[in-house]
Image (tube, coloured by chain):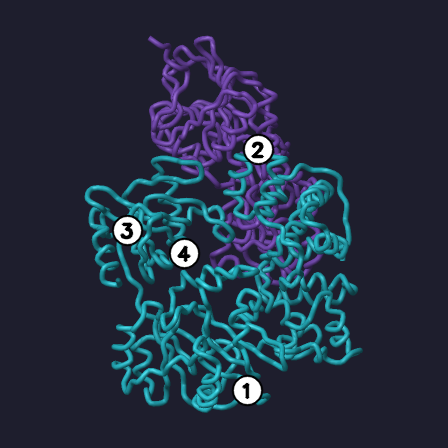
Amino acid sequence: MSLAAFATLLERLAFTPQRLGKERLLAQAFSDTLDPQRGLMLAAITGDLKLRQVTPSLLRGLAETRVDAQLFAASYDFVGDLAETIALIWPEGTRSDPPLSEVVEELSTTPKTRLPALIISRLDSLGPSERYAYLKLATGALRVGVSARLARTAFATWANLPVTEVEEIWHALTPPYLDLFAWAAGSAPRPEAAARAPFRPVMLSTATDLEQLSALDPSAYAAEWKWDGIRIQAVSDGGTRRLYSRTGEDISTAFPDIVDLMDFDGTLDGELLVRRGDEIASFGDLQQRLNRKTVTPAMLRSHPAGLRLYDVLIWNGQDLRDQPYDARRAVLAQAVAPLGHRIDLSPELDFQTWDELAALRLNPPATVIEGVMIKRRDSPYLAGRMKGPWFKWKRDPHLIDAVLMYAQRGHGKRSGYYSDFTFGVWNGDDLVPVGKAYFGFTDAELKDLDRFVRSNTVERFGSVRSVARTKVVEVAFEGLNRSTRHKSGVAMRFPRINRIRDDKPAVEADHLSTLQAMLERDA
Amino acid sequence: MAREPLLLPRPEGLYCPAGDFFIDPLRPVPRALITHGHSDHARPGHGAVLATRQTLDIMAIRYGEEFCTSRQAYDGPVTLGEATVSFHPAGHVLGSAQIAVEGRGCRIVVSGDYARVPSPTCASFEPVPCDIFVTEATFALPVFRHPPPEVEIARLLASVAAFPERSHLIGAYALGKAQRLIGALRQAGWDAPIYIHGALQRLCDYHIAGGIDLGDLRPATGGTKADFAGAIVIAPPSAFAATWAQRFPDPVISFASGWMQVRARARQRGVELPLIISDHVDWPHLTDTITELNPAEVWITHGREDALMRWCELNQRKARPLHLVGYEDEAE
């Protein structure tokens, strides 16, 4: 497969709306492409090509060697995608069409210092859609509307194999997947041997509320706190230890302190948290440790990680997923005890009626709890999100009425719309900004807000528009932190625009004192 | 006392005190000069209107014969008060004109919307030397380099050939874009019937009456799904959401617009086959036009004025944004 053919595939995938259509395009590509190109193509789509990371700032720097920085910034602001902006703006040069493997090879082996020169010479010799495909490869984020899971499903369907069997060995495979395609062709067995400490699809919950719960028998359900960390799967299998995110991404290297503690043989389901002694730190503290390739000793000391376990899938070679929840929890309780104080069991809540559980939910013992989880005692551990066996009952968000103050264009899917909003509340006679939100609204509400911004702009600061202080929005948020960065002294957790309050004049929006009182209460 | 300028922005639109008239006013005014028939430039309710014969006809088609108190079709330079005005082709849509205003030793050309890619549907843009060039900035970002229309038409025809059992449903605005698209298809040798939505009928008829050959056009009504297999159907984009679109067999949704160069725009519209066909200048044509005309000053009406201002600054050109509110920023 040449880069041009790959670019065409990406284009068609991006503009084919139906899932089935995308699967068909991928199947066609698997049939039409030879090894090793097709494996590289698949890895590019699933995000498993481990290329030398080309950073956005490096690319921006390259673009500015060809285009004025301000013009580039204005273009990026409009297009909303860095690779696409550069692909469109780069001056036309000669045209060439290298094989995908050549491009992948040089991107993974070229030393960092020589990357800029390499990328420039490629951009100078490609057409616009090939430039786009090339930059998407180089940055490692294709975003063509095909998830890794969809690509694997398409592969399984094409190869006539059960998708779960493909999923379970996926993490042990490496591009260009010659063994995988040989298995698909029936010329080799399933690449089993390599599949140590595999990821197992995680069981997920659906949202509920008191009204829905009242139809259910509380004695058939167990409940526990919903901890605000990140859901993980900890797998230790014959000496191989891996920590996976909910989606199956291997995050072991970012959490060596956890991996050290995984002295067991099995597959556990739990929440990753930053723990200092008995205290569970806020999600903000955990965030400090996420998205890092490596972790410094200082960080390990200041932000020690721990696990709080919910469930067990496999224990000492025995697959427990078919067993009822209560039986798995009994195994888990035994299993956890010897693992040290930084790994413990998520305690079950004591309740007889849904009203009692509602009361517990209203007064959680820690701010890092974001609601309760409710699980059917007789439910097996199932892959995916189905309605019924597991529910999440999140705490209600806080709500305030705020006034729209500034707007910026959105990126990605929202590009072209004014969809990033800064809103404020009254402090005396002035409005002070208290947060930014870029989701929560419906598509119709977004159009309304976008139109409002365009026709009520009073001032422009580069890409930011200041708008007439007349539009009131109801903002929902999960919590408040003190902030030294914001003039208002408060920072919101997970703010989003809940609805537009056209029925409310701006003078009736909330005051900063309301938020300050909320801070006092939480402290 | 400083001399009063020949043209100045007012809330109603661009105003000429020497001749007491507005160009493309956004609100009803006693005397209006109109560059072209798109509804954000040509609004109903004015007193006297001066425009090309075609623009007046188009306004009458859209708003009814009573769209203004009195009208005058342009027929050579006109003196209004102390100003002389003349109309010159803008290459945008049928009847579109640039308006040159001359007086007090200064000539200003108000280009309205304009395009430099020739189209069989209208006269090509005519460069008019001037002191001040008033330009749009719809596609004024260096990312906008629209491919030649024939390349896009070839992509469309390739898709039609690849999916003979489906119909291709193309969104195109009723005035200008639809006919530009049809004209380009005919030039590429597509001589099969092209089906059009009812909202395009009168304007297409008007083009044909004016001697523009659009080939065999048929209403996209009646018939069974099978009749539309392999067909090209053109409709205003708003029709796609309506049940009207359900009559076609598994349609390939397409949209003909300069915005289709940006992927997110195409995806937001649910477009499967984006066609980059524009009736505005792209970045190279816009900046080349300014360089070619070499005016002492550039005024910018609407669009991405910040970027064009920056380009003028980099090229040592005097420029100012007019910040006229009310022109469609991103319709095309």
Q: For the residue labelled by badge 4, is the local secondary structure a helix, a strand or a loop? A: loop
Tell me whether marks 2 and 4 sit on the same chain: yes
| B326 sits to left or right of A365 | right
What residue is rendered at 59% in x and 69% in y?
A149
Bin the neighbour count of mark 4 within 10 Å (Cα to Cα): few under 14, some 14-19, many 20 and up.
Answer: some
> Which of the chains is purple?
B
Bin the neighbour count of mark 3 within 10 Å (Cα to Cα): few under 14, some 14-19, many 20 and up.
Answer: many
Residue B151 in view, yes or no: no
What residue is rendered at 20% in x and 46% in y?
A507
The residue under label 3 is: A402
Name the quadrant containing residue B63.
top left
Q: For the residue labelled by badge 1, is the local secondary structure a helix, a strand or a loop? A: strand
| A426 sits to left or right of A269 | left
The residue under label 4 is: A439
Are dots 2 and 3 in contact, CB under 8 Å? Answer: no
Q: Earlier in the sequence, mark 2 or mark 3?
A: 2
Instruction: Please state the chain letter of the residue tagged with numbered disc 4 in the rendered image.
Output: A
What residue is rendered at 39% in x and 18% in y?
B16
Q: Earlier in the sequence, mark 4 or mark 1?
A: 1
- Amino acid residing under circle 4: Phe
Q: Position of residue A254 (x, y in %)?
A: 54, 64
The residue under label 1 is: A315
